[in-house]
Image (spheres, coloured by chain):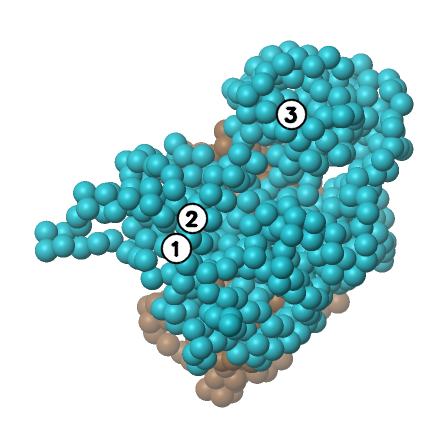
Chain colours: A cyan, B brown
Amino acid sequence: MTDTLLKMCDITKSFPGVLALDAVDLEVERGEIHGLVGENGAGKSTIIKVLAGVYKADGGSVDIDGETLADVTPRSVHDAGVRFIHQELHLVQHFTVTESVFMGQEEQTLLGLSARAMRAKAEAFFETALGTQLSGKTLIRDLGIAERKLVQIARALIDAKAKLVVFDEPTAPLTSGETDKLFAAIRKLKEQGIAMIYVSHYLAEITDICDRVTVLRNGQNAGRFDDVFDNSAPAMISAMVGREIDELFPTTEHSAAAPRLEIQSLCADAFNDVSLTVHRHEIVGIAGLVGSGREDLIDTIYGLKAPSSGTLKIDGIAQRFRAPSEAVAAGIALVPRDRRHDGLVLDMSVSDNVNLAALDSVSRWTLENRRASHAVATEMSETLDIRPRNIAATARLLSGGNQQKVVLGRWLNKGADIFILDEPTVGVDVGAKVEIYQHIENLAKDGVSVLVSSSDPGELIGLCDRILVMLRGKIVAEVSTTDLGVDTLVALTTGGAVQEVAV
Amino acid sequence: MTLRSVFARFGLIIIIVMFFSFFSYVSPVFLTFDNQVNIIEASAIVLILALGMTLVVAMGGIDLSIGIAFDFGAAFAVVALKDFGAAWYVACLIGVMGGALVGLLNAILIVGLKISPFMATLGTFFVGSSVERVFTNGGGPISYRRMPQEYRDLAVGDVFGIPTEVIIAAAVCLVYFVVLERSIFGKRIHAIGLQKDAANVAGIPVRRYMFVAFILASATCAIGGLIGSANIRMFTPLAGFSYLLDAIAAVFIGAAIHPKGRPNVIGTLVGVLFLGMIGNGLNLMGLDFNLKAALSGIILVSALALAVAQQRFR
Ligand SMILES: Nc1ncnc2c1ncn2[C@@H]1O[C@H](COP(=O)(O)OP(=O)(O)OP(=O)(O)O)[C@@H](O)[C@H]1O
Ligand SMILES: [Mg+2]
C-alpha cells in the first residue's frame, strides 16, 4: 500500500495573461525523494510557491498527512512540517555556523541563550543527520557554497519536525564534487524517513537520487515516472518537451583560423599570469572550481575589473578597457553569470532588455523607433522561444531559463566578434539548452570567437574545441575535448591529477 | 481588486481630486479661469526645477543643489547684464552656463570621486551657499532696475496672452518629455536608475551618462533662475533653496502615480500642479500666514510620505 504524505490536487494558478498551472496534481509519499522536472516556465517554481503559501492558488486542494489545509499560508505549511530550501542563500556572512542555524529559533534557558548547547546540537546535527563534520564556530564567509547549503538545510531541519523538504534547484551553484556532498546529506535525510521534493534541470541528478518523478509541461501534468532508472532520462525529456532530443551538442569541427583575442601574462588579485588565445571560429572553454579565478578573469577581460599587469589584444591591437562600454565598442559581448543582477534590468520589459545594447540601431534621430524595437524583440523571442511570447512582459516575472534567453537574445541582436558566456545554461531546461548550444555553434560557424566559462564539465566537453583549466588563479592545463572524459576534467579542476596535456 | 491594490495604484490621484473638490467647494474664486491661470503661472519655475530633479532621480540619484544652480543662473545673468552690458540673450546663455558649472562640480564629485549623490550635492549646496554669501558681501541682493525689457519679459511678458514663463516652462517640459521618455538617451538613463550594474554590463557608458545628466539638470534649473531674476529685477542670494522640497515632492508624487512607479515627466507635471493648487487654495481660504505655511508644509510632507508608502504597497 502507498502512504501518501502530500497530495496536491487540481492546483490552478493564473497570472495576468499566463495560466501558470492548469489543474496540476502532485503526490509525494512518505520518505521518498520525488523529482519535479519540466521546461523553463513549465510551472515548477509556481507550484512550489503555492505549496509554500507564497502564491494563493485559484483552485485545488493541498492535503498533508491526510488532512486538507483549510488555508495554505507560510505559517500553516511550516506547522505541518514542510520546509523549503530556496535557491538563494540567505545567510549573514559574519555569523557563525551555530548562529546561522539557530537564527530566529534560538534556544532559551532561564539564563538566556545557551550558546554552548546550541553549538553542540548544531554540530551533532551535521554529524548524524547530514553525515558531515562542521564546526559550529566557523564563520559563514569561510565556508564553501556546498557547506553553506548544508547550513541552510540544518537551519530548516534542526527543530526535527520536518516531514517534507523542498529543494528548488539546489545544485545550480555547485560544482560536481560539492554536489556529491549535498547528495550524501540528502540520502542521509531519506534514511531518517524525511520525504523530499527535488526540482532540477540536471536529469542525471534526478535519475540518480529520485524514487519517483513528476513531469510538468506548460503548466500541466505531462506524466509521472513511478520507477526511475539510470536510463529514464530520454523518456523524461520527451515527456518534458514533447519531442525526442537525440543530440544535446551540435557536432561540427572548426577549422583553425587567425587568432582574435590574445591575452598575455594577465594578472589581477584573483589570478596570476594568465595567457590565452581564442581564434576565429573557435569555442574555448574555461573550467575551474568556484574561487579558481575564473570569474575574475572574465570580469577583467570585459572591463569590469582592472588588471594589475599584462596585455590584451584584439586582432593584434592592444586594448585597455576602463569600462564594459569600451569592451563592447571593441566587439566583445558578455552573458554574465548573475543574470538577475548583471544581466537584466528586471523592471524593464523583455523588449527593452533585448534592445538595450543596440538602441542606436532602433532609433531615428536618437528617438526610439518603437515599431523597429518591437520587431527586433518579437523576432528574438521567436528565435529563442522565449515564453510567454509577450515582449511587453516585465523581465522580473519570467522564469529563470527564459530570463537567460532574454540576455542571450540581447547580444545575438547586437552582434559581436567575441562572445563571452559565463555559466550560459544555469537553470536552463534541456530543450532550451540544445537551442542555446546550437546558437553558440552558429556563432562560431559565422566566425565569432567564443569563450565559455562553466562549472558543468559535460557542457564544456560537448561544446568547446579546447578547454583551459584554472586552479587557484592559474591556468594549469589546456586540453583538447576530443576523447576527453568528464572524470578527467573534474580531476583536473580539483587538482587531483595535474598533468599537462599537450594539444 | 483589493483595497490595497486600489490604494497602491490610485491613492494619490484620489487625494488630488479630493483637494480639488474641496477647494472648489470652500472658495467661490478657486474654479474661475483667472485663478486656474494663476496656479499655472505660479507653478512655472517649480516645474522647471522639478524637471531637472526628475532627470537625476530617474537615473537613481538625487540633487540637493538645484537651488544653487537656480541662484547661479540668476547671478551670472544679472552680473553679465549689469557689469558687462551683455545683450539679453547673451546674459541668458551665460546664466545657463553658470548653472551648468554647479552641475559640473556635482558630476566631478559623484562620477570622479565616487561620492554618493546625496552627500555630494549636499556638499555643493553648502559650498555654493558660501560662495554666494562671499560674492555678495554677506548676502545682500544685486539689483538692476534698468535691465533690458526683453530680459524682463522672460517673467512678465506674454505671447498671444500666454505668459512667457508658462511658455518657457512648457517648452522645457516638452523637451524633457521627448528626451526622457522617448529618446534612447532617456531609455539608458532609466536603465541606469533601475539597475546600474546591469546597465553597465549591457555596455552603457554609465559614468559618462551620469556626468552629462547632472550637468543638464543644473543647467535646466538655471533657466528657472533667469525667470526668477527677471521677475524681481535682481539676484537674491539663496533664493533658490525654497524650491528644493517642492521639486523633490513633485518628482515623488509623479513617480507614485506612474503605473510602474517610475519618476517621469508627466507625473512631475501633475505633482507640480498639485502643489501649486494647494498653495493657491490655502491662500484663497484667507488663512493666517503662519497657519498657512504650517499647513502647506504638512500637506507637502504627507504627500511625500504617501508617495513613498504607495511605492511600498506595490
Ligand atoms: N509573479 C508572476 N507574475 C506573472 N507571471 C508569472 C509570475 N510568476 C511566474 N509567472 C509565469 O508563470 C509561468 C511558470 O513560471 P515558473 O517560474 O513556475 O516556471 P519554472 O518551471 O520554475 O521555470 P524555470 O525552470 O525557468 O525556473 C511562466 O510563464 C512565468 O513567466
Ligand atoms: Mg523556477
Amino acid type for the residue under numbered disc 2: Lys
Question: Tag 1, which secondary structure?
Answer: loop
Which is nearer the eye, A32 or B116? Answer: A32
- Looking at the image, residue A52 sits to the left or right of residue B260; the answer is left
The answer to whether the residue labelled 1 contacts the one labelled 2, judged by CB atoms less than 8 Å apart, is: yes
* Figure quadrant of residue B100: top right
Q: Above or below — where is B249 with respect to B241?
A: below
- Say which residue label 3 marks: A488
User: What type is the residue that disc 1 sits on?
Assistant: Gln
Disc 3 marks a residue whose amino acid type is Thr
Q: Which residue is denoted by mark 1 in the rendering? A: A192
- Residue drawn 70% across the image and 49% down it: A231
Residue A323, which numbered label? none
Residue A422, by quadrant, is top right
Judge if badges 1 and 2 mark residues of a common chain: yes
**Chain to which mark 2 belongs:** A
Along the polypeptide, which appears first: circle 3 or circle 1?
Answer: 1
User: Which residue is under mark 2?
Assistant: A188
Disc tally is 3
Query: Where's residue B149, x and y in %?
Result: 66, 52
Q: Quadrant of the N terminus of chain B?
A: bottom right
- Residue A226 visible here: yes
Q: Position of residue B36 (x, y in %)?
A: 59, 75
